[in-house]
Amino acid sequence: MKSRTIFITAAVTLTLGLGIVAAQEAGRGAGAGRGGGGGRGRGGIPAPIKITIPAFGDGGMIPAKYGCSNGTNANISPAIQFSGAPEGTQTYALILHDPDVAIGGDDVLHWAIFNIPVSATGLPENVPAKATLEDGATQINNIGGSIGYFNPCPPPPTTHHYMFEMYALDTKLEPAPASRADLLKAMNGHIKAKGVYFGVFHQ
């Protein structure tokens, strides 16, 4: 009787163990299916856009050339390289903002450029301060009330963080949004992937 009980217990334990293994394998298979191709990661989460700014490393100090010196604004944007957009991407959008400041509930917008062609692999240094560029990319007003890039210029002696957020979109934004709020609203539901790169600046 005792040996029979031991046998039944072992059989139940083996069956449960096999069931757990099968469930784990099925879960891994499903995850691999969702993440296969198109730049998607584990569990169907898109891999981030890869961003490189040759002038400074991710999290590094932004050179004075791309900031301000003694309150003088040159507004020269750094060259930016990006890659890794998933299948179905039609355009890119870039938002540069300073999250260390809150004005009326919003932080500071330093640059917003969108409808960047999917064929682009980067932005050159010193992007022209024009609403519409030759390749169709569009820029809107920054915190300074001007078109295009507005350089970092925190009041001394503070140090601020500047976030470069690159978005891969499945559409071209038409009509072109006229403000940051309109841009974020227009992008809603069309973001296929995103990447973030940041630098710090102080005078």
Image (cartoon, rainbow, N blue to C red):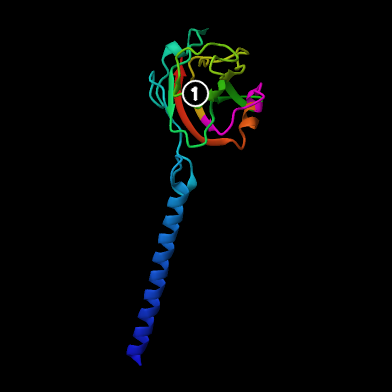
Q: x and y percent of residue 168 in the render? A: 52, 32
Magenta region: which residues? Answer: 167-182
Q: Please count the marks in the image.
A: 1
Left or right, 39 with reference to 115? left
Left or right, 195 with reference to 147? left
Q: Label 1 crowding class (10 Å Cα cut-off): few <14, some 14-19, many 20+?
A: many
- Toward the viewer: 169 or 56? 169
Above or below — where is 38 with respect to 128?
Answer: below
Q: Residue at x 45, y 28 (%)?
A: 197
Q: Amino acid at mark 1?
A: Tyr
Q: Residue at x 62, y 35 (%)?
A: 188
Residue 84 sits in quarter? top left
Q: Residue at x 61, y 32 (%)?
A: 187
- Toward the viewer: 153 or 194? 194
Left or right, 140 with reference to 78? right
Left or right, 131 with reference to 55? right
- Could you tell me if residue 15 is visible in this image? yes
Q: Residue furthest left?
A: 3
| Residue 32 is one of the magenta-drawn residues | no
| Residue 171 is one of the magenta-drawn residues | yes
Element at label 1: strand
Q: What residue does disc 1 label?
A: 162
- Could you tell me if residue 96 is visible in this image? no
- Toward the viewer: 34 or 160? 34
Q: x and y percent of residue 191 in the render? A: 56, 35
Q: x and y percent of residue 186 in the render? A: 64, 30
| Quadrant of the image containing the N terminus | bottom left
Residue 54 sits in quarter? top left
Q: What secondary structure do most residues of the magenta stretch adopt?
A: loop
